[in-house]
Amino acid sequence: MGQSIRRFHASKIVLFAVLAASFIGNAGCRPNHRRKGGDGWRLAEEVIDYTTSGAGGCRAHVASLTDFGGVGDGVTSNTAAFAAAVSSLSQVACQGGAMLVVPAGRWLTGPFNLTSHFTLFLHRDAIILANQDICAWPIIDPLPSYGRGRDLPGGRYSNLITGYNLTDVVITGDNGTINGQGQTWWDKFQSKELNFTRGYLIEIMYSSQILISNITLIDSPSWNLHPVYSSDVVVSAVTILAPVYSPNTDGINPDSCSNVRIEDCYIVSGDDCIAIKSGWDEYGIKFNMPSQHILIRRLTCISPTSAVIALGSEMSGGIHDVRAEDITAIDSESGVRIKTAVGRGGYVRDIFVRRMNLHTMKWVFWMTGRYRQHPDEGYDPGAVPVVEGISYSDVVAENVTMAAKLQGIPGAPFTGICISNVTVEVIRSKNPIWDCTDVEGVSASVSPPPCAQLQLKRGEPESCPFPEDALAVDSVAQLEQCSYRRINP
């Protein structure tokens, strides 16, 4: 450590309710600077007040990226500075936690890793810029539940920010920005110049107690936020922006994750705004880790070529107990999309969606068992996925081409579909309003009237279920108001 980490005084001001869960909450920060001069962080005194949560609470050790040689001019590489800062802070992170502050400026960097009991805090005028030199992005192994890269066989480029086998990690700030500068990657991908799969902006693997809040993500090379093989994950008040033509720039993709809460996010994407996944064909079946107990609320999405919320198509480890409510979408292809195929195996069950407001859509509801992308020829054609227990209620949609396109699997229909209190304003089109094959279910108070496979039967309930029990991830554990005062010797 030496002189790299300056001395800070930390005071815990307010302690809120402590409930059963060991982690969950929101973070918002308001830095207060008292400047001695005009050269950034060389101050006589600097105070950062913010609200945090997590097993570690307020961080006892805080440093600025400039303490490790960081230069925020948008030109100088800060890859070494980020690596040195995280390495140095990791030595004291178990002694009350550590926080790295990224000050105002434009901080060019290649990929870097995080550590446990750690907060990455972005000043409101901080922009982390991803290096556009592809040679600066190491090649890493494919995910074991995928067996290969998602774009191409073989490995994949590193992610810009990676957390691996960590506990208690926070990425937050005063709405600072992480910019993936993805245009170079999109151009090379579309012209087939890449030899490996593109990396993601943020990937957290094999980790728990993760909070990502109050930041903006822009122009990721591919997926923006990818928690995978992780639990107790909260994503709150995150803005994600990418051109609607950009390839595979999914917003938030929980993948083989349990206990996830996504709330108050605004996403403009070239692909699905949220896609829940759990592995691809035989590799996902072998890895056998489902995505389950997931809450999505107060999401706003714009995605003209993809879904507001997608389940799959990589779902071979199973997807279970997803609850989404208070969803707004504008100019998006489909409201909820379930994608699978013979060879996937696994299941999608107990999916509950309510209170959706949709404006300008191709489909409100879309399900397909014919999404035939496979990682290789080793998939099992006898691995037939199960889709059952899908409930949609309280949906209003306008300027829609088709109410629904529901295509199950012959001999293995999608069952237990329930649609209630839905009003769809369909524009004039040659397409059928409802297109249903190999599906079974019920409906009530749906306009225009649904297909025969979903007609209400005598004795069936007139509204679709939505669980009212609380999930563990929905319980606020501990909130603390923290204050750090930076004092130069």
Image: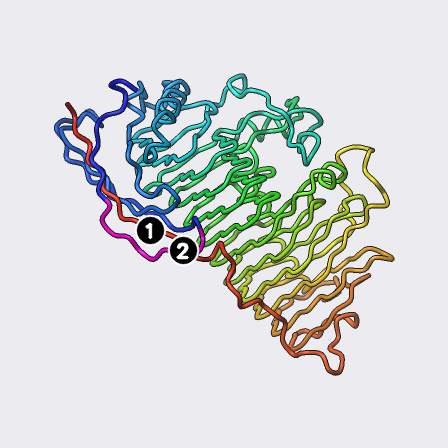
In what element is the residue under mark 2?
loop
The stretch drawn in magenta includes residue 387: no
* Distance CA(mark 2)–CA(mark 1): 8 Å
Determine contact: label 2, label 1, CB under 8 Å. Answer: yes
Quick one: which residue is furthest to the bottom in this view? Answer: 458
Q: Nearer the viewer, residue 351 or 93?
A: 93
Q: Quadrant of the C terminus?
A: top left
Q: Nearer the viewer, residue 290 or 96?
A: 96
Question: Percent position (x, y) of residue 206?
Answer: 55, 36
Q: Nearer the viewer, residue 155 or 14?
A: 14
**Left or right: 37 in relation to 272:** left
The stretch drawn in magenta includes residue 19: yes
Q: Kindly identify which residue carries mark 1.
A: 479
Quadrant housing residue 422 = bottom right
**Left or right: 118 in relation to 378:** left
Type of amino acid under label 2: Val
Question: Percent position (x, y) of residue 35?
Answer: 14, 32
Type of amino acid under label 1: Leu
Quadrant housing residue 280 = top right
Residue at the image point whose x is 29% and y is 32% from the top? 61
Residue at the image point whose x is 64% and y is 32% from the top? 143
Q: Quadrant of the N terminus?
A: top left
Please state the extent of the stretch shown in magenta in the rendering: 12-21
Q: Kindly identify which residue carries mark 2.
A: 476
In what element is the residue under mark 1?
strand
Question: Percent position (x, y) of residue 106?
Answer: 34, 28
Q: Is residue 463 above or below residue 170?
A: below
The crowd level at tag 1 (other Cα within 10 Å; few <14, some 14-19, many 20+) is many
Q: Is residue 136 above or below residue 244?
A: above
Quadrant housing residue 314 = top right
